[in-house]
Image (tube, rainbow, N blue to C red):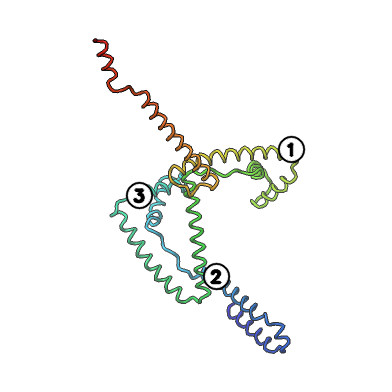
Amino acid sequence: MVSLLARSVGLLAKSLAGLSCTQATRCSSLPGALSAFQHTTTRWFSKQQLEEGLPKRPLSSFFRFVSEHRPTLAKQYPEAKLTEISKILALEWKGLSESARKRYVEAANEELSKYKSEVRKYKENLNPLELQLLNEKKKERLVKRKHIRHRRELTILGKPKGARSAYNIYMSENFQETKGISMTEKMKHLQEDWKRLSQSQKQMYVQLAQDDRIRYENEMKAWEEQMLEIGREDLIRLKAKKRLIKDSKMMHEAKSKEQLHKKVVKKQTKPARGGKKADKRKNKE
């Protein structure tokens, strides 16, 4: 395919050489367009080659442990879900001693050094455009991985689920009963049915969506207060952060005023020195 592209580019160059001066002037923008076309096509072919020839990263020490012990656990607990088995394996991995982990760590390090050597050799055979594409793909993977980690972290921290729209509520309630084999067919039928509903029929779902919005805001308010307490202000929405910081300052000021008031009252109600002794002396006299 690449040789065919080079041949077509050569034929185009020969045809341009046969043009007159006026025609060449009119086509002065062609070299730029030709280079852009060649650049885009090279990137497309490079992408295909990169996906086929790029060395695969080896498993880490933890995932080596998981791949070794997961089949045994799956046989012992056939009704257990994959997530449950993964949690058990994660706990077992944390409980392993350094000596028990050693063989997994050493095997992972050995495979990783081989992988780095293969990647180094692989990059030496790439042209500048392919190398640029490889770096772009690496950045995309890192961004995607970061996004997945962030979503997992929010799930672990118990962030409330977002509020649903009226249309989403209608879809979830009627999805199973809708005609169609594939999901796209069902979605299409639901969309058409939703458009045919009258305003009075939609009002019920609008009200449910408003109630769900209230639920979401209340749960988010409580969750963001928890995040502020544990020092995760980076997970709080900007408006909520300003409100929470303002509320915390007001609470702090109120507490300080209350403590100051208690000190003043305590000082005023404190009996004078020798007051009781003086009263006893008077009674004796």
Assess whether mark 2 and mark 1 are in contact (beta carbons under 8 angstroms): no
Nearer-the-camera pick, 101 or 152: 152
Q: What kind of residue is marked 3?
A: Lys
* SS class, disc 1: helix
Name the quarter where the C terminus is drawn. top left
Residue at numbered disc 1: 200
Residue at numbered disc 3: 94
Based on the displayed image, in which of its 4 quarters is residue 13 positioned?
bottom right
User: Relative to residue 166, is residue 141 depicted above or below?
Assistant: below
Quick one: label 2 or label 3, which is nearer the N terminus? 2
Q: What kind of residue is marked 1?
A: Ser
Report crowding for label 3: few under 14, some 14 to 19, many 20 or more residues within 10 A (C-alpha).
few
Quick one: label 1 or label 2, which is nearer the N terminus? 2
- What's the CA distance linking mark 1 and mark 3? 57 Å
Q: Residue at x 69, y 37 (%)?
A: 204
- What's the CA distance linking mark 2 and mark 3? 39 Å
Q: In x, y percent, where is residue 274?
A: 27, 21
Left or right for 205, reference 106: right
Q: In x, y percent, where is residue 144?
A: 51, 58
* SS class, disc 2: helix
Q: What kind of residue is marked 2?
A: Lys
- What's the CA distance linking mark 1 and mark 2? 53 Å
* SS class, disc 3: helix
Residue at numbered disc 2: 47
Q: Residue at x 43, y 64 (%)?
A: 57
Q: Residue at x 43, y 31 (%)?
A: 258
Q: In x, y percent, where is residue 224?
A: 50, 43
Mark 1, mark 2: which one is toward the viewer? 1
Based on the displayed image, in which of its 4 quarters is residue 163 positioned?
top right
